[in-house]
């Protein structure tokens, strides 16, 4: 019997295999039972991104919720995850649900639960919702128009709400002064309409509706973004490149030469901008796979640095109860002070554009400024697609402490906050961790440069697979 289980960020499965209308009804009913404990008349925002079946699954969710006495604000058209989170916050809803599988391959769809504060539901909430998911089939609810007539389902324009929020928080005219040099890759995702409306003079790639994503996972990492990189490299009129994933909560970024700027460097840029130009303070909360350089810069600036398990919901918990400057993951999910406690690829892209506009400097020049104080570095990653038995064996060997060396690299200490981080002295570190959303073993390494980091990765790959 298949058991529905939420991973690091939502429940995700292959469409028409386990992600079916019948299973969506089960999860929606469980969500309704949780919401019923919060209020006599709970309110929930529901939306969907660009994936196949998104509209159908969102309406299925809305109908089940409405049938259980939940007032539903149903998004009109394609929306991003941050739009649903912002909508939940601004509409004083108790929760939000978005139908999305984020950066997963196009065969997947998923179900994310957001809280009324405008960020991911906490682990305790996810556990509670999971506890309500039963084996019993849930009958379809009445047609959508029935609940519309009753006023239980109302349509809402979350995109306009988001655009208004942007205009109230950014110097949009300053952004427009350099936006003609922006190259944006929507990756066929939910960020496409916002950028079109904000910057009609920008150059856009893959900004049409294509649920197949050209057969690629819409994850904004370098191997998926070679086209944008080459375009910038060949045309010096571009000042930077921005990419967002399928539901637009993750960011990919490129400098004026077409070189990929990973999240580790983006976090450092944001720390500099928010402290030096915005005058903000607060804690920096980062996931276990983020570069040590972030902690180094925090020490220089007198900021407290906190490390969490991987998954933005853990970062969000700190943002709800602490004064947090930045909450950030290695995977491109970043939230900052002054916005909702939610990852938002477009929002972070706008902050970086504003940084460039206000300083008159290129991204590469701003990174050079950072290197002058903390030194250069690189973090690289391998995603190993392994059969479950091999993956489990490797994880068990990590738990047992069987890895004392990886080739010529000697393990000096091990941390196990989430996965297993092997400290290799001056050489750097390597982290081995099974993905919480995909059948993948992720291996990360940090060292003084990219070549050195890949050398560590190759040594580790050889050690664990032979």
Image (spheres, rainbow, N blue to C red):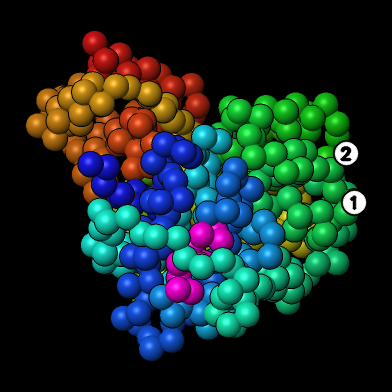
| Residue 191, percent from left and from top | 68, 52
Q: Residue at x 30, y 36 (%)?
A: 433
Q: Nearer the viewer, residue 339 or 28?
A: 28
Please provide the residue range marked out in magenta: 58-67
Could you say which disc has been placed on residue 170 in the image?
none
Q: Main secondary structure of the magenta part?
A: helix
Q: CA distance from mark 1 to mark 2?
A: 13 Å
Q: Nearer the viewer, residue 339 or 134?
A: 134
The C terminus: image quadrant: top left
Dot 1 corresponds to which residue?
201
295 lies left or right of 74:
left
- Res. 276 in view: no
Q: Residues within 10 Å of mark 1 (few under 14, many from 20)?
A: some
| Residue 181, percent from left and from top | 84, 46
Residue 249 occupies which quadrant of the picture?
bottom right
Position of residue 183 relative to residue 259, above or below, is below
Dot 2 corresponds to which residue?
237
- Res. 353 in view: yes
| Residue 339, percent from left and from top | 58, 71
């Amino acid at each position: 019997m298949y058991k529905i289980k939420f991973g690091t960020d939502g429940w995700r499965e292959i469409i028409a295999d386990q992600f079916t209308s019948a299973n969506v009804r089960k999860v929606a009913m469980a969500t309704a039972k949780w919401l019923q404990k919060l209020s006599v008349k709970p309110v929930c925002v529901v939306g969907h991104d660009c994936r196949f079946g998104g509209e159908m699954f969102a309406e299925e969710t809305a109908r089940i919720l409405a049938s259980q006495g939940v007032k539903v604000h149903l998004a009109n058209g394609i929306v991003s995850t941050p739009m649903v989170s912002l909508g939940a916050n601004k509409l004083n809803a108790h929760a939000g649900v978005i139908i999305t599988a984020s950066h997963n391959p196009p065969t997947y769809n998923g179900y994310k639960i957001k809280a009324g504060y405008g960020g991911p539901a906490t682990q305790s909430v996810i556990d509670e919702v999971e506890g309500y998911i039963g084996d019993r089939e849930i009958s379809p609810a009445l047609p959508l128009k029935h609940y519309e007539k009753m006023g239980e389902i109302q349509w809402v324009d979350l995109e306009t709400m988001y655009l208004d929020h942007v205009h109230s928080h950014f110097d949009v005219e300053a952004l427009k002064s350099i936006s003609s040099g922006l190259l944006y890759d929507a990756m066929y995702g939910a960020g496409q309409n916002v950028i079109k409306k904000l910057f009609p003079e920008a150059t856009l790639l893959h900004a049409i509706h294509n649920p197949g994503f050209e057969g690629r996972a819409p994850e904004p990492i370098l191997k998926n973004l070679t086209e944008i990189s080459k375009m910038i490299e060949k045309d010096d009129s571009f000042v930077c490149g921005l990419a967002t994933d399928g539901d637009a909560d993750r960011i990919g970024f490129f400098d004026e030469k077409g070189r990929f700027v990973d999240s580790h460097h983006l976090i450092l840029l944001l720390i500099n901008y928010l402290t030096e130009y915005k005058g903000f303070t607060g804690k920096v909360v980062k996931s276990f796979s983020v570069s040590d350089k972030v902690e180094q810069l925090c020490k220089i600036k007198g900021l407290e640095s906190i490390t969490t398990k991987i998954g933005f919901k853990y970062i969000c918990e700190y943002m709800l109860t602490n004064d947090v400057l930045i909450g950030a993951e290695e995977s491109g999910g970043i939230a900052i002070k002054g916005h909702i406690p939610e990852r938002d690829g477009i929002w972070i892209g706008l902050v970086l554009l504003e940084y460039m506009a206000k300083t008159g400097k290129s991204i590469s020049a701003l990174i050079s400024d950072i290197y002058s104080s903390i030194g250069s570095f690189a973090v690289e990653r391998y995603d190993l697609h392994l059969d479950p038995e091999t993956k489990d064996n490797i994880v068990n060997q990590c738990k047992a402490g069987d890895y004392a060396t990886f080739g010529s690299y000697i393990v000096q200490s091990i941390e196990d906050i989430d996965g297993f981080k092997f400290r290799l002295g001056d050489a750097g570190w390597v982290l081995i961790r099974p993905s919480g959303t995909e059948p993948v073993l992720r291996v990360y390494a940090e060292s003084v440069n990219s070549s050195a980091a890949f050398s560590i990765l190759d040594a580790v790959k050889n050690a664990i697979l032979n």
